[in-house]
Amino acid sequence: MIMKEAGPDPTAGLTVRFEEGGVLQVEELQRAVLSSSPAWVTLAFLARERDPATGEFRAPRVSLRRYKRRAGRFVVDKHFTLTNRAQALSLADTLATWFAEGGPAATDSSDDDDG
């Protein structure tokens, strides 16, 4: 489930896009807000990195990033990268199994604390 917030998006400036020497090194393809609270936000980024040896972009990767609000702005607290398609699909399949009706995590956790 992708969370939507009313009003201005406090995560708008958060990105994995990166340039070095005027050359795009990390291209952000898509992003999704997975959870959000006044103190924390969790984002998933689909991005691809430039291979320094060839100059070509590598296959897309998924970066999961947890940000904590400090001094009025969000800073990366934790992050994890799924480095290939097989790893991303395996995680998606595992989560779908765990959270499917009748699965071990199928209870409604909508009232869980996001912190």
Image (cartoon, rainbow, N blue to C red):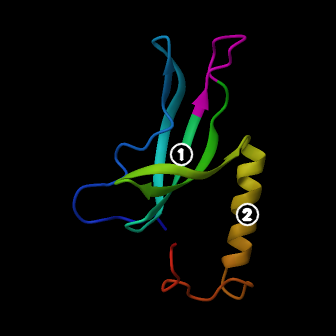
Query: Where residue 101 sits: x, y (%)?
Result: 66, 85
User: Residue under circle 2?
Assistant: 93
Q: Which residues are magenta?
A: 48-57
Q: Nearer the viewer, mark 2 or mark 1?
A: 1
Mark 2 and mark 1: Cα distance apart in space: 19 Å
Q: Is residue 12 above or below residue 3?
A: above
Residue 50, position in %: x, y? 62, 21
Instruction: Please state which amino acid type lies under the numbered disc 2.
Output: Asp
Instruction: Identify which residue is drawn at 77% across, 49% down.
Output: 87
x 67%, y 79%: residue: 100
Residue at horizontal 67 percent and vertical 26 percent from the top: 58
Q: Secondary structure at mark 1?
A: strand
Task: Look at the picture and state if 55 lies above or below 44.
Answer: above
Q: What x and y, as percent, mark residue 94?
A: 75, 66
With respect to residue 43, does 56 lie above or below?
above
**Earlier residue among tags 2 and 1:** 1
Left or right of 99 in this view: 42: left
Specify the label residue 45 is tagged with.
1
* Front one among 109 and 72: 72
User: Quadrant of residue 49 in the image?
Assistant: top right
Query: In the figure, 74 relative to 46: above or below?
Result: below
Q: Residue at left 49%, top 83%?
A: 110
Residue 54 drawn in magenta = yes
**Mark 1 neighbour density, 10 Å: few (under 14) some (14–19) many (20 or more):** many
Question: Magenta residues: mostly which secondary structure?
Answer: loop
SS at mark 2? Answer: helix
